[in-house]
Amino acid sequence: MRAVTQSVLGGTEVLRLEDVARPEPFYGEVLVRVHAASLNPVDPAAREIGLYIGEPPFTLGWDVSGVVEQVGIGVTRFRVGDEVFGMPRFPHRAGAHAEYLTAPARDLALKPASLSHVEAAALPLTGLTAWQSLIPRARIRKGQTVLIHAAAGGIGHLAVQIAKSAGARVIGTASAANREFVLGLGADEVVDYRNEDFTKAVEDVDVVLSTLGGDVAERSVSVIRDGGTLLQMHYSTRDRAFPEAVRRGIDTRFQLVEPDGSGLEALADLVERDLLRVHVARVFALEEFAAAHALMEAGGFAGKLVFGLV
């Protein structure tokens, strides 16, 4: 099979499209023929510094949508021919940027019938990040106010919709160019982060979701009510201490997404009820791996980048 591999850490120049051995499913696993696999910001970070997955050789990628080709011993969840999607093994190695991968059956779910494989591959990592943060952890509910930073981004554009489906009032930060896109997702208000200081435009919110580095998370504490929640998930802020948050009883624990079959099913249910849609900014062929990584690092697009293999 073909896979995008690397043998050393570095820039896009270290990536290679090579023929490698097709994996075999172990106990409790399935073999998936990959129809589409998406990129996330963690992929360039893993490529450059081995974030989460250590030293090469490896094949990057977690988000996947495809068809079950083989079922390992003990698997009762799926059958050969089932269309599935998921984020297997994260943050350990999964190897989704390839024509086949093996995955624990419990890390996958049936693909929503209304989504193409390209759309389904764009959903797991970002969708589960937003879902696990806003629903099981923050337990947002009707009438609360949620501030979502980078609301046009991969996680942000899904978080807006998930928060709205729970009945929250949603404020998003985005560039002026993405204002209408974010409003179209259901946001009640958009703050232009390039021309407005969100700490002056927003106050007394119940929950803030921040995927950004720098000082955004720390500055966000000032707009949260006492006892509220700061959902911070940028790796660079994982060990930051916020004295004001401690004093005011604000939960600021770093959160990392986990594989979650039931969470995927919850996302699929929102999709089928027309409460959640995933935006794909661009589709690349697997051979265009360097261009895809370059665009991911450059940013400035709304939604997700996806490799379409079939």
Image: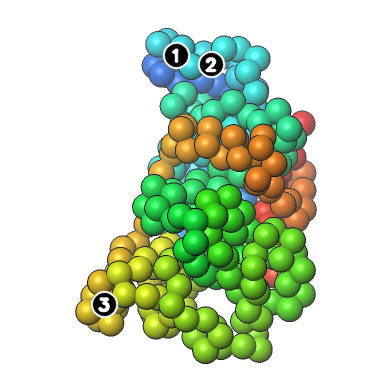
Q: How many marks?
A: 3
Q: Position of residue 134 (x, y in %)?
A: 45, 54
Figure check: 135 above or below 67: below
- Residues tagged 1 and 2 counted as in contact (Cβ below 8 A): yes
Left or right, 154 with respect to 87, comes to right
Q: Which mark is residue 78?
A: 2
| Type of amino acid under label 1 | Val
Mark 3 packing: few (<14 Cα in 10 Å), some, or many (20+)? Answer: some
Q: Position of residue 39 (x, y in %)?
A: 62, 51
Q: Which residue is mark 3?
A: 248
| Type of amino acid under label 3 | Arg
Q: Could you say whether the residue bearing mark 2 is in a helix, strand or loop? A: loop
Give the CA distance from mark 3 to mark 1: 48 Å
Q: Could you say whether the residue bearing mark 1 is in a helix, strand or loop? A: loop
Mark 2 packing: few (<14 Cα in 10 Å), some, or many (20+)? Answer: some
Of the 4 image quadrants, the one containing the N terminus is: top right
Q: Can the viewer see residue 133 in this picture?
A: no
